[in-house]
Amino acid sequence: MSSSQEIIYSDTAGVSRIQPSVISAINNYYCTHATEGKVGIKNSTQNTIPSLKNEISTLINCSSEEIAITKNTTEGINIIAQGYPWQPGDRILIPDNEYPANVYPWLFLKNKGVIIDYIPTKNGVIALEDINQLIHSNTKILALSHVGYLSGYTAPLNKLGELCKQNDIHFFVDAAQSAGVLPIDVKKSNITALSTCGWKWIMAPVGVGFLYCSKALLKNITPVYVGADALDEVNIYSPKYPFTFFQDSRKFEYSSSTLSVAIGLNKALEIINTISVKKIEKQTTAHIKYLDKALKNIGFNSYLKHKEEPITRSGILSVKHKKITSEELHQKLLSHNIHTALWHGYIRFSPSYLNSKEESSEIVHCLTKYL
């Protein structure tokens, strides 16, 4: 196997590679930990967390009080799913092709009498009229991914948010495949809550993410875990009950978190916000458009098909060949140091904005030569 510098990496939707400056920021923290111990950790925490929440606020257009730092997308989903004041007969709308992370936390609510209504998808696409037909007087939440993990379909957040607003429904978004590569404005899209991880398109370390919970929803969510860090108490060393939670998203941050990965996330977001998500989107989707067209010319079919309206591009393209199995082609690409993902019989390409035009061309050249 050749060195990592020679790898053509097209699996950002799985786990991204992190940049040298992110690694440097993490290493600096560990040096501080090694030399200064607890004092260094406290100072790093006081400097990092406000900065991180400010970077997140810039990324999705919200206030820092609406942000909680989490370990992953699933943790954020569970905070909302388990903390909401459900009543038997309440309903949730979920697309029928969702990634498991955005299904099981909601499905588990069946033990509370909550009903799950599945939105049918057609070739990876969600139709607004199908959602409309499924809305019930007891529907409380529409939960979906901004970008489909296999299809690459980009849900029309503004239209969906308006639909939820008209029907007094909370709008929950799994942004694991969009945060950092596609613009997100939670206020403009009327998103009530959003969860994501940092190690895909944000290009941060594994083990950190964030939850956005709007001020309107915050008051209705009871924390799943309870710890001193989540409490607005004068003296936490003299426990009493009842106690008072913070009124903002700090009530979900109950205890110590892994500071090193939070520092990595902060640096990664700093890079993204400096460049701007719009520029990153333009560069990333240019790779996808090129690959889509070039691969179709050599016998590939893409998963995402929608004749009624133009496809909104994301950073994901899933394809299969008409004659050769995806498993065989995936292994051939890997043997040439081209990293992709294999999902449900499709090869999934997800290059980042850091990929070059030459790398995209090399992918097509490799497959053309093999075919």
Image: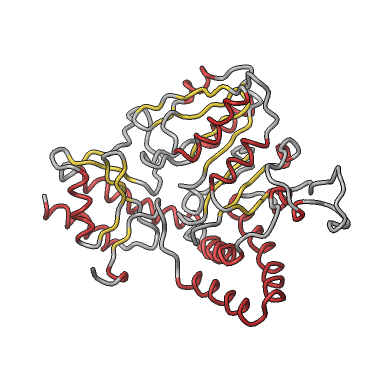
Q: Is residue 201 above or below residue 140?
A: below
Residue 266, position in %: x, y?
58, 63
Which quarter of the figure has residue 2?
bottom left
Residue 4, position in %: x, y?
31, 69
Residue 123, position in %: x, y?
34, 30
Asked if residue 263 lies left or right of residue 362, the reply is: right
Q: Residue drawn at (40%, 31%), measured in percent from left and top?
A: 125
Which quarter of the figure has residue 194?
top right
Name the one closer to the observer, 215 or 249.
Answer: 249
Q: Residue drawn at (84%, 46%), measured in percent from left and top?
A: 243
Q: Is residue 104 above or below residue 166?
A: below
Name the one closer to the observer, 101 or 242.
Answer: 242
- Disc tally is 0
Name the one closer to the observer, 227 or 232.
Answer: 227
Q: Is residue 140 above or below residue 269?
A: above
Q: Tell me the quadrant of the picture where the N terminus can be found.
A: bottom left
Q: Residue drawn at (48%, 49%), measured in percent from left and top?
A: 182
Which quarter of the figure has residue 357?
bottom left
Way the structure is coloured: secondary structure
Q: Residue drawn at (55%, 39%), measured in percent from left and top?
A: 173
Residue 352, position in %: x, y?
39, 57
Asked if residue 82 lies left or right of residue 129, the reply is: right
